Amino acid sequence: MAPRIRPAFVLVLVAAFFSAPAGADIACAPEAGSSHHVARVIDGDTVVLDDGREVRLIGALAPKPDLSLASAEEPGSREDSNSRENWPPATASRRALEALVGDRQVTLRFAGRRVDRYGRVLAQLSVTAPASATPPAGETWVQQHMIRVGQARAYALPGDSPCLAALIQAEAEARLARRGLWSEDRFPVYDAADTGRLLRLAGRFAIVQGTVRKAARTKETTYINFGDTWRQDFTASLPTAVVDRGGAEVARRIEGLAGRQIRVRGWIERRNGPMIVLSTVDEIEIVDGPDTADPSQGD
C-alpha cells in the first residue's frame, strides 16, 4: 500500500535542488516566439494554431484514455481519437484547455527543443483571457494553469526541463487539494516498495515515492537505489554527466539522498526490477516527512 498524507503534514520541498521559476511571464522559457490564434484543441495537452501547426504543451501531461496500453501515457503516442474523447478524465482535461485557450490568441515561448519527432512544436504557452473567462482577464501560463487545476501532470523530456520545477510546484498544490485527476484513484503516487505493481506499469508514466537506500555512481550512470537488491527493487537513474553539470553541490546532494523520502517521475522501464531513467535532477523531489505521499490508491 502506498504511504498516505498525514493531516498535520505541513511542508513538501518540491523543488529539491533549485528554486522554482514562476509567474505568467514564464521566466523559465526566455525565448519569445510568435503569437497565434488557437484554431482547435486536440486534447488536454495539444492544440492546432491558425497556421496549421500542432503545438504540444511541453511539461504538462494530460490524461490519456487507456492506461492498460503500454504507450498510452507517452507524449508521442497516437491513440484512437474517439476513445480519447470518450474517456472521462481525458474529456475533462480537453474541455479545461478549450475553456482556457479555445478560439483565443496565445503566445509561444521556448526553453529547449522546439520540435518533436512528429513535427509538433514544443512550447510553453501563455494566453490573455477576457474578463468573462475562467481564470479572469490577465496573462495565464497555460501549462501551469492546467496542472494547478489538476488536469495534467508535470513531466520533462531530455532537453526540455527548465520549467519543470515550477510545474511540479503547481502539481503539488493540485494533489494536496485533490483537484481534477488527483481526486481519482486511478492516478496515485506509487510506492517504491511495490515492485510487482511497478513492473506492471512498464511503458507508462508514473510518480513513485519511497525511501532511498543508497546512491551509487559509475562513470556513465548514477543510480538511486530504493532497496538492497538492484535486480529486483525499484531504482531511479540519471546520466552521471547530468549530475556533473550541476557541479559539486548537486553531486553531494545526490550522495546525501540515503535515508531520505523522495519522489521521482518518468516512464517505468523493466531493467531487472522496475526503473525510471531521469533526464534532470529536477525530477527528484525531496519530501519533508517520513509518511507524506499522495493518498490515491489506483491501479
Image: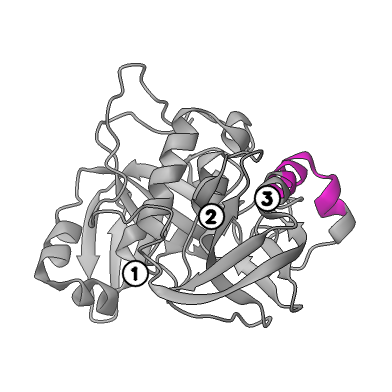
Residue 227 visible from this viewpoint: no
Compared to residue 145, the image places residue 71 above or below, namely below
Q: Identity of the amino acid at label 1?
A: Leu
- Give the mark toward the camera: 2 or 1: 2
Q: Which labelled disc corresponds to residue 143?
A: 2
Secondary structure under the numbered disc 3 in the rendered image: helix
Write the residue at 45% across / 60% down: 275
Q: Where is residue 46 in the image (x, y as percent from the top left)?
A: 68, 63
The residue singled out by tag 1 in the image is: 238
Q: How crowded is mark 2: few (under 14 residues within 10 Å), some or many (20 or more)?
A: many
Answer with left or right where residue 70 lies relative to residue 295.
Answer: right
What is the C-alpha distance between the residues marked 2 and 3? 9 Å
Q: Would residue 234 be counted in the magenta stretch?
A: no
Write the residue at 56% across / 67% down: 107
Q: Where is residue 278 in the image (x, y as percent from the top left)?
A: 40, 65
- Give the mark toward the camera: 3 or 1: 3
Answer with left or right where residue 246 lies relative to residue 293.
Answer: left
Secondary structure under the numbered disc 2 in the rendered image: helix
Q: Identity of the amino acid at label 2?
A: Gln
The residue singled out by tag 3 in the image is: 97
Residue 146 visible from this viewpoint: yes
Write the residue at 71% across / 78% down: 53
**Residue nearest the viewer, comparing 66 with 64:** 64
Compared to residue 196, the image places residue 156 above or below, namely below
Mark 2 or mark 3: name the one nearer the start of the chain: 3
**Residue nearest the viewer, comparing 125 with 295:** 125
What is the C-alpha distance between the residues marked 3 and 1? 32 Å
What is the C-alpha distance between the residues marked 2 and 1? 25 Å
Mark 3 or mark 1: name the one nearer the start of the chain: 3
Q: Identity of the amino acid at label 3?
A: Leu
